[in-house]
Image (spheres, grey):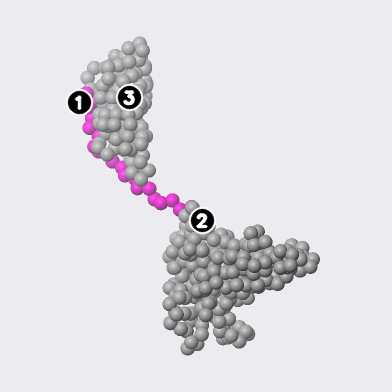
Amino acid sequence: MTVRSAWLLPKAQTREDTRLAPVSPVAHESPIRVRDGVLPGGDPFAATGVAAMQLQIGAGRAYVQGTDAQGAYPIANDGPVTLTFTDGDAQFGRIDTVAVRVLDALFDQEGQNLARIEVVEGDPGATPTAPTLEPASLRLWDVAVPAGTSAGVGGINWGSALGDRRRYTTAAGGIIPRGWGLNFNGSYDGQYRDNGGELERWNATAAEWQTYRAPRRTESTATGFVVSSTYTLNSFAARRNPDAGVCAFVVEVSRKGAQLNVETAGNINDEAIGTLPSGWRPSIDADISVSDGYGEGSARLSTSGVITLRTWTGNGALRSDRNIRASCTFLLP
């Protein structure tokens, strides 16, 4: 037996059927319906042209959803299945579908209890479309059959005729891999899917898939700044994001004692304002801007966290009754 199904044959389900067919809970589309599809892993139900008009479908496992009353059927194909396509129409091309189908005598008119992989032939037309499938069917591949195609004239060009229609499903709560047919809604708030290298999360309120970005870990501090003996600390605030490797701070100080005279070129004697706490310091030395609201200057922020005042412009002096503010955003080591 090649195509197996669990929960189908009354009193005839074998041990092998139970072991091979997937029976764990899968992602749901409604309170009673599962998201049917192929289970990822390797290249399930791979299609390979083996003759002019023959296609081979490889091993794979899947869930096939029937009506709400039927429920879902776990399916396992444990060996290659070879399918033969009929010759093309004399005038128009058509699209055939390769599908997994479950026949259940309790719910259909076929009078059989089995699972199989079959070709569902489409209607020829000037603009052909894929055929509509019977209930309890799962589309795997669409095959374009051009007009006049037959084994005698070379058969189907398998390199261009195949359209991959495998969609994927996972265990309940799992991330759904990218497959055919991305235009589907999530079934619950917080469901995830892989959109080809981009993780998306279903937002039920907005009714849309949104790119998922992990919350950044942000820390703040209002203490730890060691002010220089020639200055008084007015305020200090810093925030860092260790995950992004970024830190920012704002510090305000007042100078004690006499004012600092400024040379014509704007230079002053280097003077330390204070030191950032450990763990809140830059990866490389950085020049930062400082201001007291009247004049401006520059300071050097070192990897050891020391802020050193270096230049100043504004009326030839840095007065001691003004508040000096320094701020900077930098990369953490």
Q: Secondary structure at mark 1?
A: loop
Q: How far separated are the C-alphas under marks 2 and 1?
A: 57 Å
Left or right side of 90 for 53: left
Which residue, given by chain and number where applicable, does mark 1 sit on?
229
Q: Secondary structure at mark 2?
A: loop
Q: Which residues are magenta?
A: 211-231
- At a point 67% along the width and 61% down the height, the residue shown is 157
- At a point 29% along the width and 14% down the height, the residue shown is 261
- Identify the image quadrant of residue 240: top left
Q: How far separated are the C-alphas under marks 1 and 3?
A: 17 Å
- Which one is in front, 296 or 151? 151
Which residue, given by chain and number where applicable, does mark 3 sit on?
299
Which residue, given by chain and number where applicable, does mark 2 sit on?
195
Q: Magenta segment: does it hold 221?
A: yes
**Amino acid bearing label 3:** Ala
- From this viewpoint, is residue 275 visible? yes
Left or right side of 251 for 257: left
Point out residue 206 in the picture as x, y percentages from the top left corner.
Answer: 51, 57
Please tell me whether residue 312 is drawn above or below residue 218 in the rendered image: above
- Judged by its main secondary structure, the magenta piece is loop
- Identify the image quadrant of residue 108: bottom right
**Amino acid bearing label 2:** Asn
Q: How far separated are the C-alphas under marks 3 and 2?
A: 47 Å
Q: Quadrant of the C terminus?
A: top left
Point out residue 296 in the picture as x, y percentages from the top left corner.
Answer: 37, 22
Please tell me whether residue 163 is drawn above or below residue 297 in the rendered image: below
Q: Residues within 10 Å of mark 3 (few under 14, many from 20)?
A: many
